[in-house]
Amino acid sequence: MNQPQPKPGILDIKPYIGGEGRVEGVTHLVRLASNENALGCSPKARAAYLAAGADLQRYPDGSAADLRAALGRTYGLSPDKIICGSGSEELISLLVRAYAGEGDEVLYSQYGFLMYPLCAKAVGATPVAAPEKDFRTDIEALLKAVTPKTKMLLLANPNNPTGSYLTRDEMKYLCENLPPRVLLLLDSAYAEFVEEKDYDDGKSLVDAHPNVVMLRTFSKIYGLAAVRLGWAYCSPDVAGVVNRVRGAFNVNAPAQAAGIAALDDHEFLQKTIEMTRMGRKFLFEQLAGLNIRTWPSVGNFILAEFGDKSEAVRNALKDKGIFIRQMGAYNLPHHLRITVGTMDDNQRLIDALKIARK
Ligand SMILES: Cc1ncc(COP(=O)(O)O)c(C=O)c1O
């Protein structure tokens, strides 16, 4: 072989493909494929982002001190236990890189977020999926799947793409029964959308268990997917590990500025929560009216079953500029995931579905 070769296993990885968002000749696009915020982003965040553009010649603050302080104030946390990343995706990938490698196992739930097995493979570790029951994480199955080789457990709560969640008590039980040598990445990317009283985002679990890391993102409720900004709440030891392996300036300056401003825009947050609550209810009702099976979701998206018509339906919608997400990569070829949009988006989707399914 006369050319450079990547490490074994790298070429077996199927790259993550994001949701589609373009179609030739269609100008009004309804983008419901990536669980983004259909309202846009906070006007305050946009203004801060643009203002930061005046100083592009300067390196950003590599420690993101002001952003960590703002996160600490907003969520009542110590900034020393917060680390920031270029999207929570970067933090997932850095943590897997730092804690797992060849010969190790990285555990996740069967329909857990696709990035988890991909990140495990990227470091030569073996991703191990614990079976789910009815699209819900099965804690006993996860605990049963722990072996001496298990280094990490990656768990989204609520989970994408299923929309299901584990209660505060279930998460407490998991943390109490997981061996403390296993790092638990509790990915609470959609926490702000959950209104159920028995849900907890996991901050208190981090305080009680040094092996738990809570991950958050600015990409969803804050509508800042384009700037790439995420953060984690973890023990100072885990923070120290990430600080050793991350890029020195991993979060760019406009992203830091936008994040600080977004945290201050309660009105935008509230509007997003209300839009999501109303839209989710509307979509559940309308999809039921069309005899399309859905699963309960507490996130800003809904998993729906379309049987063997799934690809045809998705393509028919796409031709009209309406994008929803195929689930083949999750081994769910008969399902599609729909992000909750504005009421106009949701209505367009339902109108198009009525025609596509005829
Ligand atoms: C569960 C979950 N975690 C993490 C991410 C990645 O978010 P970010 O944009 O912060 O990288 C997503 C994005 O869809 C997600 O669904």
Image (tube, rainbow, N blue to C red):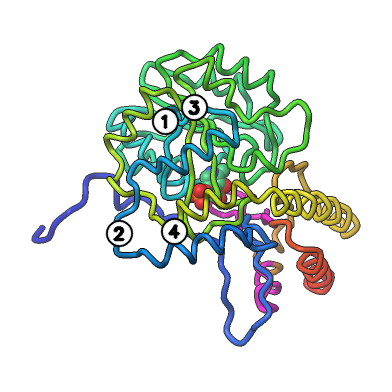
Looking at the image, do the residues carrying marks 4 and 1 touch, with CB atoms under 8 Å apart?
Answer: no
- In reply to whether residue 323 is colored magenta, the answer given is yes
- In which quadrant of the rendered view does residue 356 lie? bottom right
Q: Residue furthest bottom?
A: 25
- In which quadrant of the rendered view does residue 91 lie? top left
Q: Is residue 348 above or below residue 6?
A: below
User: Nearer the N terminus, badge 2 or badge 4?
Assistant: 2
Q: Position of residue 20 (x, y in %)?
A: 56, 67
Task: Tell me the element at label 3.
Answer: loop
Inter-mark Cα distance, 2 to 4:
11 Å
- In reply to whether residue 293 is colored magenta, the answer given is no
Looking at the image, do the residues carrying marks 3 and 4 touch, with CB atoms under 8 Å apart?
Answer: no
Give the magenta range: 314-338
Q: Residue at x 82, y 56 (%)?
A: 283
Q: Residue at x 57, y 84 (%)?
A: 24
User: Nearer the N terminus, badge 4 or badge 1?
Assistant: 1
Q: Amino acid at mark 4?
A: Pro
Q: Which residue is mark 2?
A: 58
Q: Which residue is mark 3?
A: 78
Q: Amino acid at mark 1?
A: Val
Q: Amino acid at mark 2?
A: Arg
